[in-house]
Amino acid sequence: MAKKMAIIASKGTLDSAYPPFLLASTAAALGMEVKIFFTFYGLQLLTKDPNLKVSPLGNPAMPMPVPVPSLIQIIPGLEWFATWMMKRKLKKKGVASLEELRAICIESEVELIACQMTVDLFDFKDEDFISDISRGGAATFLEFASEADITLYI
Amino acid sequence: MSDFTVELDTTGLNCPLPVLKARKALSSMNAGERLHLIATDIGANKDIPAFCKMTGNPLLEANEHKGKLNFIIEKGQD
């Protein structure tokens, strides 16, 4: 029987969006059955045009071309710049785009589950999301996770 | 380098793309056919053997030549 992996994706920044889609697509390539449960800010990963960002604010480990003090990082445009820089770097290093990894997940039958409670909480509409998703709650995730060989909270 | 049926060049691509593209290539091949995978992602040195082991596609050969990693993977029985 195929091994199973259950992931909770709870964050909506560009850098945090990579691990769920990257590990899920790879696990599927290794023959595993994968389900990702998207909750809270992770729901952004299921939107049609995610437009995710990365912020150096509150993230002292983020490499910057020049040191930028925290107080300066609140300046409008810095988040945009950091995101632009990160995307450029990802492309230059031959890393797949999020859209590409998400498409591979869908193609390899990874089940993408939107947490219904947080969909309601944030007033998301059906049309905000891509069509290849299902809906579920805590018990939906736990039922699958209880039989999973790998369970990750991201 | 052994004979092969299909060649797949993933030069410049980073993890996990060599594995994902290898899976896609193998899925359209017949059992016993061989895939020649070329990669520059150093991580592929460990990732491709792991992929082969988990998916039952034997890794027949692995070497490095002029900065490129070469793998010969045989498509296993489904």
Image (cartoon, coloured by chain):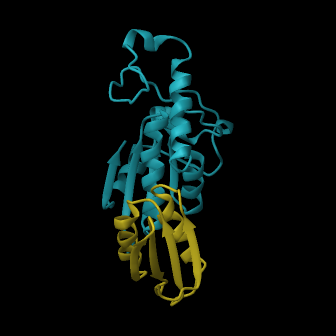
Against A37, residue A3 (above or below) is below
The percent position of residue A19, horizontal first and vertical second, equals 42, 47
> Which x, y percent locates residue A25?
48, 58
Residue for point 46% across, 80% down: B72
Q: Colour of chain B?
A: yellow
What residue is at 64 percent from the left and 45 percent from the top? A130
- Furthest-front residue in view? B66
Q: From the viewer's perspective, is residue A26 above or below residue A92?
A: below
Q: Nearer the viewer, residue A89 or B77?
A: A89
B62 lies left or right of A84: left
Give the quadrant of residue B41.
bottom left
Q: Is residue A38 left or right of residue A107?
A: left
Q: Quadrant of residue A144?
A: bottom left
Chain in cyan? A
Q: Residue B16: give x, y in percent of width and height.
A: 46, 58
- Residue A40: x and y in percent read 46, 32
- The residue drawn where x is 40% and y is 69% is B48
Q: Nearer the viewer, residue B63 or A149?
A: B63
Q: Is residue A125 above or below residue B43?
A: above
